Image: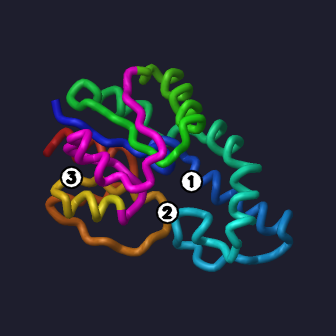
């Protein structure tokens, strides 16, 4: 059975979008400023002119709220169970062990309790190789490009403003779970 390495935030959960909402509110209401630098950046630490201390303070205050209330991305709860008939899944995430636990609870709610989770992985490429994944689904373009260079089929879930990257034999750009389903079931 082929294996899929799955990211959580911005792929299974709409937490990336929810972070965008909370960071805008935080910047305006708490910091009382307009410190946005580049709204095309995926993660908030790169979108604002915030120093490391402000980023850490924001994360400490809002991460649990965002990660426990984020919705499942439209279609993920339909497509993942269908794909599990043909593929094995492993979640590979940069989330901490505690944060990954919150995701596991949400997975149980939709009947996906038999998926392996690997947490604290910021550089995922070695883990993809160790786990022998055939495909990855991630919303980080550099992760997808790096995986494709290692001959791992990368599905770039483009859910935010970003620079344009080119598709190739090992890199597919999608915008929703229906497109992921079509790609995986017809290739």
- Image coordinates of residue 173 in percent, x first then y, are 31, 59
Please name the residue that numbered disc 1 is placed on.
16
- Where is residue 57, by image quadrant? bottom right
For residue 58: magenta? no
**Secondary structure state at the residue bearing disc 2:** loop
- Front disc: 2 or 3: 3
**Secondary structure state at the residue bearing disc 1:** helix
Image quadrant for the C terminus? Answer: top left
Q: Is residue 7 left or right of residue 1?
A: right
Please name the residue that numbered disc 2 is placed on.
160
Q: In this orientation, which residue lies closer to the viewer: 4 or 24?
A: 4
Q: In this orientation, which residue lies closer to the viewer: 14 or 122?
A: 122
What number is the disc on residue 102? none
Decide which of tag 2 and tag 3 comes sooner along the chain: 3
- Image coordinates of residue 16 in percent, x first then y, are 56, 53
Decide which of tag 3 and tag 1 comes sooner along the chain: 1
Please name the residue that numbered disc 3 is placed on.
153
**Alpha carbon distance from label 2 to label 3:** 21 Å
Q: In this orientation, which residue lies closer to the viewer: 10 or 46?
A: 46
| Labelled pair 3, 1 in contact (Cβ < 8 Å) | no
- The residue at 78%/62% (across/down) is 26
Q: Is residue 21 left or right of residue 109?
A: right
- The residue at 83%/69% (across/down) is 31
For residue 141: magenta? yes
**Alpha carbon distance from label 3 to label 1:** 23 Å
- Image coordinates of residue 143 in percent, x first then y, are 35, 60
**Secondary structure state at the residue bearing disc 3:** strand
């Amino acid at each position: 059975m082929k294996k899929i390495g799955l990211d959580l935030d911005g792929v299974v959960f709409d937490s990336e979008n929810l972070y965008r909402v909370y960071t805008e509110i935080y910047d305006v209401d708490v910091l009382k400023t307009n410190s946005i630098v580049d709204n095309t950046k995926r993660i908030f630490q790169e979108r604002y002119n915030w120093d490391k201390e402000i980023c850490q303070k924001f994360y400490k205050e809002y991460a649990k709220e965002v990660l426990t209330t984020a919705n499942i991305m439209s279609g993920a709860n339909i497509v993942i169970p269908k794909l599990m008939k043909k593929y094995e899944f492993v979640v590979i995430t940069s989330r901490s062990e505690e944060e990954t636990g919150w995701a596991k609870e949400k997975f149980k709610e939709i009947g996906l309790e038999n998926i392996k989770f690997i947490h604290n992985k910021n550089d995922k490429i070695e883990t993809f190789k160790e786990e022998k994944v055939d495909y990855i689904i991630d919303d980080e373009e550099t992760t997808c490009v790096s995986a494709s260079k290692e001959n791992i089929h990368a599905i770039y879930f483009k859910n935010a403003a970003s620079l344009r990257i080119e598709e190739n034999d090992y890199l597919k750009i999608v915008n929703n779970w229906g497109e992921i389903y079509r790609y995986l079931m017809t290739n």
